[in-house]
Amino acid sequence: MAHDFGGDSEFEDQSNEGYQEPAFEAFMCPLTRQVMHDPVTIETGQTFEREAILKWFKECRDSGRKPTCPLTQTELRSTDISPSIALRNVIDEWRARNEEKELEKACNSLNLQSEDDTLHALVYISQMCQKSSAKKNLVRKEGIIPTIADMLKSNSRRVRLKSLEVLRVVVEDNNENKEELGEGDTIRTIIKFLSNEHFQERELAVSLLYELSKYEPICERIGAVYGAILLLVGMGSSKSENVISVEKAAVEKAENTLKNLEKYETNVKQMAENGRLQPLLTKLLEGTPEVQVAMAEYLGELALANDMKVVVAEQVGALLVSTMKTGTLPAREATLKALREISSNECSAKILLEAGILPPLVKDLFSVGAGHLPMRLKEVSAAILANLVASGANFRSIPLDESGQTLLSEDVVHSLLHLISNTGPAIECKLLNVLVGLTGSPTTVTDVVSAIRSSGATISLIQYVEAAHREIRVESLKLLRNVSPYMGAELADALGGSSGHLSSLLRVVSDDRSGVWEEQAAAVGLLGDLPERDWNLTRQLLDLGAFRTLASKLVELRRGTIRGNRHVAPFTEGAVKVLYRVTCALQEEAEYVELAREVGLAPLFVELLQQMSSGLDAVQVYSAMALENLSMRSSSLTTVPDAPPPPPGFMCACFGGGGKANNPKPGALGTCRVHGGFCSLRETFCLVETGCKAVERLVACLEHADARVVEAALAALSTLVGDDVANVTEGVVVMGEAEGLRPVVEVLVENRTEALQRRAVWAVERILRVEDIAQEVAVDQSVASALVEAYRNGDARTRQTAERALRHLDRIPNFSSAFHHAAAKPPATTAKNR
């Protein structure tokens, strides 16, 4: 392709003057006055260029004249011509000598500092090489190719551009010249142009590389240059509609160069590493068995993007599964490693399951004796199985054999448990991961739990929490946590016995290294999922200092003194659940009350209510539930001051003195307006303490999207208006000051769940006992409608509460006192008994 480099045309028009030596007159054709290439002699003995004399004869015939000699005008008897071989040889020798001299002069010009002389010489070499392949050979023999290659490092862009163009002409259709150019670091220099900002340099460089790649030995050298294939892949991927035609030509050249490079397996691997995977897949599908093994090995070494894993599974998944079943051991090894990589994506794993990977995979895992897989490959099989399980596929519908057994069949799970206990750490870890996956789904966990119980494997699984390998400990903790909702009592008994496993877990939890790590999060998560009303386990945790340790770590996390990472969220959730146990045991022993005061549980739970990160809803739920339990104890823990002595002259009303009992009013003398005594958040767990923001944060939780958070927050707020507080009205006022009355009413109106409706009806009835509030709410038809709905469809207790609330709104008439005295009195209600 010719390019205008701002001055090259003037050199091309000079016809190489200064390089030509004078020709002998005998070399010149009398008709053309040019040096002859194919001299021939006619009847008169005159010599002409073959094409020129034949043209003369044709003109004679066309004009109706007899043929004559152009020089003598003698009429010819015959138009036969005879090659002048001797003259042609002499001319060829003269021309060769002349060209050698001209090339020598051109080469000398390349070494001059004059840019114009260099460009002039390059133009001459290009023109000469375009004449014949012999000229290209002459350029090579004269040693000019390395000289031109050196021009690629010139400071002049015009020289570099012309050098790239001339080299392409020199090597075109000439493998010897390609071999010559491919020596040294010239290939590397050409490839550097592919990342150049100047597009013409990139385009000419890729054109030259394309020409070179037609010669197979050069393909290997191109691929050996670091980054070459990546740059070509990048150019070949530029298929935007906005690319101009010249750029499209470069893109096409890059694409064709890559196709030529595919002849070498090492290049194919590099292409796959750089996102061009199809050549590898094609060789895997169409290659010889040896090539297929090599491609499978490459595939197993690649770190594929998820979308590429899907492509691979779709195109070669069936072939890989077939090889896994019937291939030689080397082929199976390469295939298994490839399948391990491909199966690590949910979509690709499901494609492999459809291709039938599961039955032979499980068979290989469980097989023993002659022909079985070596242990190193069973480890790979276990990893693949873990990936497949993580896909969430329906393993009930995938039979493993003709008997219809599945991965969830009791015998199969027993085999997995047996294999875990009788293999090395690597396989144990992967198989535990398989069970973690199966127990992570509510549709399959019960099958695994049943098999664990029937095999008596509970103790064995718990023992792994003290394994030497951290990965095994983590996976075993995840598994135990998954099954704890179904066998919590068994796990609590096994952990809390004399085995010391509980102490081992707490050593992990109390590790004071910087940050929170996965094993800590898993251990705390397991402890948090054990039954919170197992008082024996709670006592052991207290004696081992678990509660103090976890409270301290949560405080440090809130302060930022412990480095945060992805394990902080599950650790926080587990720790909050464990600390919640303390609030469930407050009425069991006074020691738990002292512990809650000592570590500041109430202030900590108030702080934890303000969780802005997603995925921490459980932290807010358990924090609010804990605050409910703590707040329920406030009335019994507060110290009510003694009544002041009556003033002088005070007389009992019984004797006509008209006086009243002189008990202090709530809020007087610095007492709590709700509980009537001296309260604080830390000592008596009072939510009303000024500045603690407990009520405000619980009110904020009423607008949470998770109904569990709303229910727990509403339950905690309800403790301020229960029968056990000194002044229910003040409790309502406190909620009103925190702008919590409207949110409570809105919870009732929204009617999101039955449990929320029951709690909201109870809380609204308490609020409506304040006459001013009842009058204000009465105008809101939605509240009355929600109460009517609860009255019609709620359970007996909710119906009774809704009826009282409707009376406050005057929606149900109040009957005579005699009628009320005749009716059975409703039972007293508290925040826990509503």
Image (tube, grey):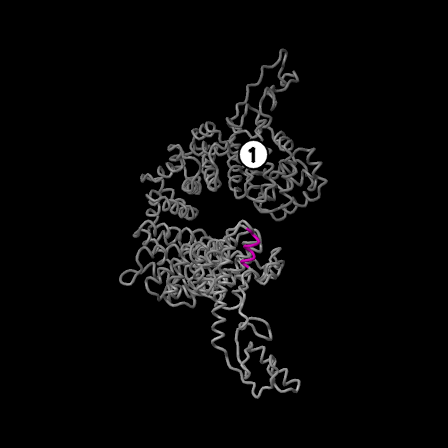
The reply to whether residue 117 is visible in this rendering is yes
Q: Nearer the viewer, residue 253 or 284?
A: 253
**According to the image, label 1 marks what residue?**
719
Q: Which residues are magenta?
A: 114-122
| Quadrant of the image occupied by residue 549 | top left
Percent coordinates x, y for residue 353 in the rendering: 44, 62
Which residue, as the protein is rendered here, is positioned at the far bottom? 77
**Residue at the spot 48% in from the left edge and 59% down from the top edge:** 104
119 is within the stretch colored magenta: yes
**Residue at the spot 63% in from the left edge and 43% down from the top edge:** 748
Residue type at mark 1? Thr
Left or right, 438 with respect to 112, comes to: left
Relative to 341, residue 718 above or below: above
Relative to 334, residue 461 above or below: above
Relative to 31, residue 623 above or below: above
Question: Please, what is the dominant secondary structure of the magenta stretch?
Answer: helix
828 is within the stretch colored magenta: no
Which residue, as the protein is rendered here, is positioned at the far top? 648
Which residue, as the protein is rendered here, is positioned at the far right? 779
The reply to whether residue 342 is visible in this rendering is no
Q: Nearer the viewer, residue 27 or 124?
A: 27
Percent coordinates x, y for residue 210 in the rendering: 50, 62
